[in-house]
Image (cartoon, rainbow, N blue to C red):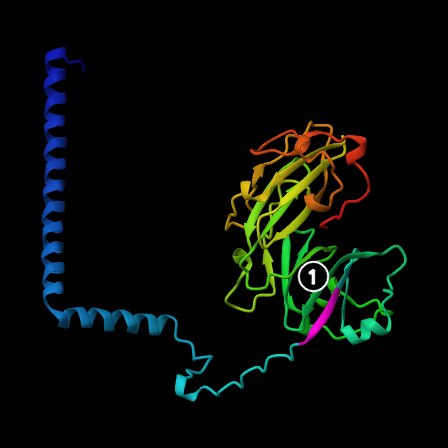
Amino acid sequence: FGIDQVQAEYVAEIKLRNINKEYILKRVAETSALQDEIEDLEDTLAKPGRIRKIIITELEDVKKKYAVPRRTEIVYSHEMPEEPEEEPAEDYPVHLFLSREGYFKKITPQSLRMSGEQKFKEGDSLRQYFEATNNSELLLFTDKYQVYKTRASEFGETKASALGDYLPAKLGMDAGESVIWLCLPGDYSGSVVFFFENGRAARVALSAYATVSNRRKLTGAYCDKFPLVCAVQLTEDTELALETNEPRALLVHTSLLAPKTTRSTQGVQVMNIKPKYRLERVLNAAECGIVNAARYRTRSIPAAGAVLKPEDSEEKQLELL
């Protein structure tokens, strides 16, 4: 059968009124339920006895659901056995040698006087040498952007004729990891400057490597974004000479580099280097052999430096790494 427009609109209006009425009744019922729930919660908060009862009920439910016998004992502080204090190792002067392939030797002055010629594996050579003490703390930086913390006292004394301890094995390093630099932090009051191939330098406060616990390995020891050229330990500000393979040189004072507390900081651009060249070495400015120092010196960074003249490129440099 058919209905006209007026009849259709009337039927639709009746249906709409019923829907609206049903919706309103549902909302009223929900409001009433919420009011009852609020009143019940307020009553619970006002009665500590009800709160305790709820807690007891919930704990009993947990006990029934997850009942497992205790696997450990509760040990109270007064029952703890007293651990004997670790006696500090005897402190005395030592000479420390690190080879380029990661061999480490600790030699006493007396032993060194008897035989001063150092033995290395074929193809290996000396990387770093220190005069220290047996209790000196050591920071060993690796090519995997990690640093291993240890003490000279943890290594046995050896002779110049021996190869020494192989550090990757001694310190349990990761597969393929090699030591690239050794630092003696002392009281952690100085800083370390990391120089990268693109001319950037990151100065990190040594305090960033200090730890309260006896952690042997720290990750993120330095920035992993650029290839590392070398690292320089500073106890006070000094002037350094940067040389590229162009060859170009720049004399820069470390006071222009602000120390950071973040070990993995990317640092700042110190030397502007053309894309096809790279930073090759960092030298002590006082011993690098440069005669015309004013030609290469800068008072602000970044700077391009100057092309190295023949009279300034004599092999008198003392490499810091």
Which residue is most to the top? 4
Q: Quadrant of residue 247?
A: top right
Q: Quadrant of residue 29?
A: top left
User: Tag 1's secondary structure?
Assistant: loop
Magenta span: chief secondary structure: strand
User: 187 above or below 251?
Assistant: below
Residue 95 magenta-drawn?
yes
Residue sitting at x 76%, y 63%: 97
Residue sitting at x 69%, y 27%: 274
| Left or right position of 191 against 26 | right
User: 281 above or below 128?
Assistant: above
- Answer whether residue 105 is visible to the viewer in this image: yes
| Residue holding disc 1 | 173
Which residue is most to the right? 122
Numbered range of the magenta stretch = 92-96
**Quarter of the image with the N terminus in it:** top left
Q: Nearer the viewer, residue 153 or 237?
A: 237
Residue sitting at x 21%, y 69%: 54
Which kind of residue does numbered mark 1 sit on? Met
User: Residue 205 at what x, y percent from top left?
Assistant: 53, 53
User: 145 above or below 252?
Assistant: below
Residue sitting at x 83%, y 72%: 113
Q: Which of 115 and 217 is in front in this view?
A: 115
Q: Nearer the viewer, residue 54 or 99?
A: 99
User: Residue 26 at what x, y percent from top left?
Assistant: 13, 41
User: 202 above or below 142?
Assistant: above
Residue 47 magenta-drawn?
no
Q: How many labels does the image show?
A: 1
User: Residue 229 at what x, y percent from top left?
Assistant: 70, 44
Q: In which quarter of the image is residue 312?
A: top right
